[in-house]
Image: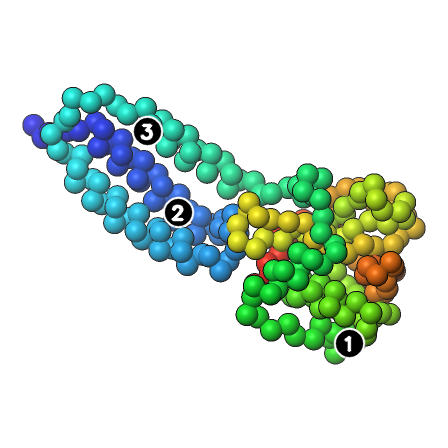
Amino acid sequence: MKRFNINELFKFIIMVGFTFYFYYLVLADKLNLFINPKMVKYIIFASIFFTILTVYQFTKVFTIKTKKSVNISYILMFLTLLIGFYATQTSLNPNVANKKGISNNFSVINSNINKSNTTVKPIVESSNSIIFTDENYFKNLYDIGEDLYKKYKGTKIVIDGFIYKEDTLEKDEFIIARLMMACCAADSQVIGLVCKYPDTLNLKQNTWFKVEGILDFKNNVPIILVNKLTSIPKPKNLYVYPFN
């Protein structure tokens, strides 16, 4: 009869669980819930590394059994794995804005863009409009902030996001916001632009809209004078990234 080591078996099962978890995150496109796409290559490397470790751990299952009882720390590892799988079924809720506050003064925008080697390109399209997408969202906010007193006043602007309201705003104002992730979900922040709209009271917090309007400034802060609001479904990926 082959030797059988229960402690090594538990280690093997845990290794299988984490290896499967990493592959699941990659193949199910769940990584964007936790990390910036620039970091995906490291998770792929970790998946390969864990596969090798798991194969090696399997060879240790059939070794001489020690007198030690089953280590209670294995339970904590299993719980960590279960929490990880649970977390992949959800994403950071826009309600985080109520806890972290929102950044629309461009100090965070500027500090993050300076960490990137990416050149900020002109944001006005051939249609003489500023059109925000997931790919250019952060850069557009930066460019608007840099040219605060300059050329973009009066330009048509189109931007998607969720509705955020706070007490410091006027009754006819709201913020069209997005979640920004620089590195991982832990450092996520809410960024956006103030919008002026007469029917703001009827807009529900955290609902998603496409905003079309004219860019203006109020007290040295960019503001959108809304011409049109269109309800849109919540996107699959709630995040925008500073280093696309």
Q: Of callouts 2 and 3, which one flags the residue occurring earlier in the amino acid sequence?
A: 2
- N-terminal of the pair, mark 1 or mark 2, is 2
Mark 1 or mark 3, which is nearer to you? 3
The residues bearing labels 1 and 3 have C-alpha atoms spaced at a distance of: 60 Å
88 w.r.t. 148: above or below = above
**Residue name at image x 31 percent, y 40 percent:** 16
Judged by depth in the image, the label closer to the viewer, 2 or 3, is: 3
- Give the labeled residue for mark 3: 74
Looking at the figure, which quarter contains the N terminus?
A: top left
Q: Residues within 10 Å of mark 2 (few under 14, many from 20)?
A: many
Q: How is the image coloured?
A: rainbow
Question: Above or below — where is 20 with respect to 120?
Answer: above
Q: Earlier in the sequence, mark 1 or mark 3?
A: 3
Q: Which mark is residue 184?
A: none
Q: Which mark is residue 22?
A: 2
Please state which amino acid type lies under the numbered disc 2: Phe
Task: Work out whether residue 236 can be spotted.
Answer: no
Residue 224's x, y, as percent? 83, 60
Instruction: Give yes or no for contact between labels 1 and 2 (Cβ–Cβ under 8 Å).
Output: no
Question: Could you tell me how far apart the alpha carbons at marks 2 and 3 are, in whole angstroms?
Answer: 19 Å
Between 134 and 224, the one nearer to me in the picture: 224
* Residue under the point 23% across and 21% down: 69
Query: Could you tell me residue 182's position as x and y percent?
Result: 57, 55
Residue that numbered label 1 is attached to: 127
What type is the residue that disc 1 sits on? Ser
The amino acid sitting under disc 3 is Tyr
Would residue 8 be visible to someone looking at this image?
yes
